[in-house]
Image (cartoon, rainbow, N blue to C red):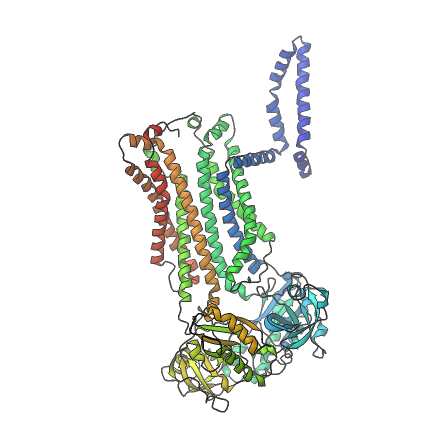
Amino acid sequence: MILRWFGRLFSRRRLERDLDKELRFHVDSLTQDFKAEGINEIEARRRALAEFGGMEPARENTRDARGTRWVEDTFQDIRYALRTFRTHKGFTAAAILSLAVGIGANAAVFRVIDGLIFHPLEVNRPQELFFIESSSAGSSRFSHPAYLQLAETAKPASFAVMTSPTTMQFTVNGVAELRTAQLISGNWFSLLGIDAQAGRVLSPSDDSVQTPQPVVVISDRYWTRQYGRAQSAIGSTILLNNTACTVIGVAADGFSGVTVGLPSDVWLPVTMQQAVHHNGNASTENADGSKPWVPQDGISWLAILGRAPESVDRNALLAALDGRYRQIIEARLDGIQDPNRRTRRLQDRIRITDASRGMSFLRRQLSPALTVLMTMVGLVLLVACANLANLLLARGTARSRELALRLSIGARRGRLVRQLLTESMTLATIGGIAGLFAAWWGAQALLRLVSTTSTPVPITLPLDWRVVLFGLGATLTTGLLFGLVPALRLSRPQIQDSLKSGGRVVETGSRHNRLPMVKVLVTVQVAVSLLLLVGAGLFFQTFQNLVRIETGFDRESVITARFDTRLSGIAQADLSALYTRMLEEAARIPGVQSTTISTVGPATGAARISGVSIDRYTPPPDEDTAIHEEFVGPAYFKTLGIRLVAGRDFNERDDERAPQVAVINETMAKRYFGETSPIGRGFGYGNTTDFQVIGVAVDVRVNGLRSDVPPLAYYPLRQKPAEYVRNLYVRTSGPVEPLIATLRQSLKVAAPGVAIREVLTLGDLTERSVSAERLVSRLSAVFGMLGVAVACFGLYGTISYSVARRTNEIGVRLALGASPSAVRRMVLRETLLLVGLGVAGGIGLVFALGRFAETQLYGLSPHDPLTISGMSVAVVLIGLISGALPAWKASRVSPTVAVRHDV
């Protein structure tokens, strides 16, 4: 039946020809019958047509019987709509631009959300993948022996391990740079179903520690960038943290790992951990971090990735894994003496989480901000829909005669509604297509706004079926939203009035007391626009409140150079001389007042955390006395502008031969030493006398502007000169920007084998912790202004249309003695009424919806009265400006012309 229907649809011309032949045959037969009765040919033809009932009604009935008439009518309506759009180019351009901006902005934000949150990994059967995590620790890190034991337990599933992508120093042809690498087990690629496009990928045989020379697999991106896709890359040598590695293959095109937003350039076996000096992102318990980590059960540093067919019962798999993990934990308890820690470890459980979309730290950071932006662009689209509905209603008035004529000659109202909706959907489709093209560019622009450098955040942004389906849904919804109300209202014209050749109507009395749909839509636009503006104001103030937070250090006059001496392969015995050269070379730069170095530094996103015991402090059973630690060079507090509130700074006597000392921050002093002075008190690793407190420094926001200040202890680098430094700071007396390039060049001279990650001000580094807030602040301002602009355009059009409709009335008023200023006040009162109702509705929306954005705000309430009142006044003023031009035009109407004006 379906095939026959399509056959009738695509054979319309042949069927029409057959229909004409059949109709002519019947008419000709009747004509011949009448002629046989002696009637002349003309009269016989007339009688035949009269008896047959007419050719055209028969054609229409036959076409309806085919079941394809609605398709033919739709194509006819589309052709008619396109001709109409070409005739009214100004209206069409305005409508398509509004739709392209609204749909494009929505599609662009959704495309980023899709790439970050919804898009599955580009691997074989991603729905079968899962991660194993430790519930109580909230971590996915396990030791290598624990991985092997868990993998043996759950035979229906297969497992592989990996580290988080980590920074390593790549040296190729003598040029050193910092890139991202990942340590994996040899079966990792086969578990994911990833093959090599050149050479081979790692295999379980590469896990052997007996490998004569370490091997690595590079990504397609790095192959293109570094080797120009040359086959000679296979077999070449890369120095990873000064360790020679042989390139054995290039991963599949487009594959960059399973960590979304942090692609890897190189993969190497986990057994190379000590060879490449990897010692980050690990927790140690009764283990020696200086020895190889793979055989030690006390070092947790690997994430476990699993694959199981969908037919495998996940609950049974989890039970098996959890039972084996409890045995692993119980075996470790012998080395833990603290009863609180023993209790916490026994509460640890295994859990399984979905890995089909990979892991992502960026996802957790940006998801709330993207949700807010998706809501805001949705509101912008709603304002655009209301504005287009207004335009269609105003434009439909000029078509009232056409529509009334169709109804008068027998057209059904449903047919008119279908035609008007087809025109709206055609307009929405054109705007949707333009919007999808805009989304292609807009999504990349959005990533640049999120990024802290000129390079966008590396998220894959495919224009796949989800984005296309979203764009199609937005287009259809938009077409219905702005097309349905005009279609229903315009399909019911007053036939007698509309068919008049002209008429002059003075609109008075009750007709003004009604609020037409056009004005209701304008009120909605104003209300939603106020909501957008208040949101923009709140997010802007949030960002300003965050960047104005007292950080505890000088952000304006200090430049930091970031690097990692662990990765350069420099022997620990040579580190002290290296640091001295770097500090001396930086101090020679004109304008530099002081220099220093540190291991972690504020606002870097890194942390060094250790559990300690505090002199005369007994922690509660559920408290883990962990502190952040930092090793600092000479003049650290002076260079960074960190003020000491008690005690003294480090000096030359605090060296390796002196007792170990520390300066703690105010948070650590209050939490562990209470109201008593901490000066002279001690703390340490199981021993409360390891370090003596000699000073207290103000709190520094080391973990970002939104994060709470943790307990922090500073140690002098002189007492442990073999620590690996990652940051150099210089304090300047003048402009900082000219010194950035100079400092980078100086460090290359002092340490040619150390790759510099970046050189920037402490202020720029600190603002990275509020990149999501910066994104929301910038884009909400854009969307808010866009919404107000569209609403004002709609308000201007509505007031202008109202003035045009009341030209007769205005002319009569002026003829009877009304002054132009009175006419202007009348029009402005109407404008103020619409704006006032919209503002009232907008304030209601703010109070109703503000709580949903509360978690994104900082330092103010979602119902902040100053923001709401200020934005309300701004909307009222902008609205009055929008109504001022129509009011001025109305006051200059000539009474003689106005009383003859056709409605």
The extreme left residue here reads 817
User: Which residue occupies 43% across, 55% down?
Assistant: 781
Which quarter of the figure is the C terminus placed in?
top left
Residue 440 to residue 202: above or below = above
User: Which residue occupies 38% across, 34% down?
Assistant: 804
Residue 519 to residue 586: above or below = above
Total numbered badges shown on the rendered structure: 0
Residue 604 to residue 14: above or below = below
Residue 866 at what x, y percent from top left? 34, 58
The answer to whether residue 483 of the structure is visible from this angle is yes
Residue 366 at what x, y percent from top left? 51, 62
Closer-to-camera residue (830/136): 830
Q: Quadrant of residue 15?
A: top right
Which quarter of the figure is the N terminus placed in?
top right
Residue 885 at what x, y percent from top left? 36, 41
Residue 533 to residue 552: above or below = above
Q: Quadrant of residue 647?
A: bottom left
The extreme bottom residue here reads 657
The extreme front residue here reads 590
The answer to whether residue 628 of the structure is visible from this angle is no
User: Which residue occupies 27% across, 35% down?
Assistant: 819
Q: Is residue 306 left or right of residue 630?
A: right
Residue 24 at what x, y percent from top left? 67, 21
Closer-to-camera residue (157/684): 684
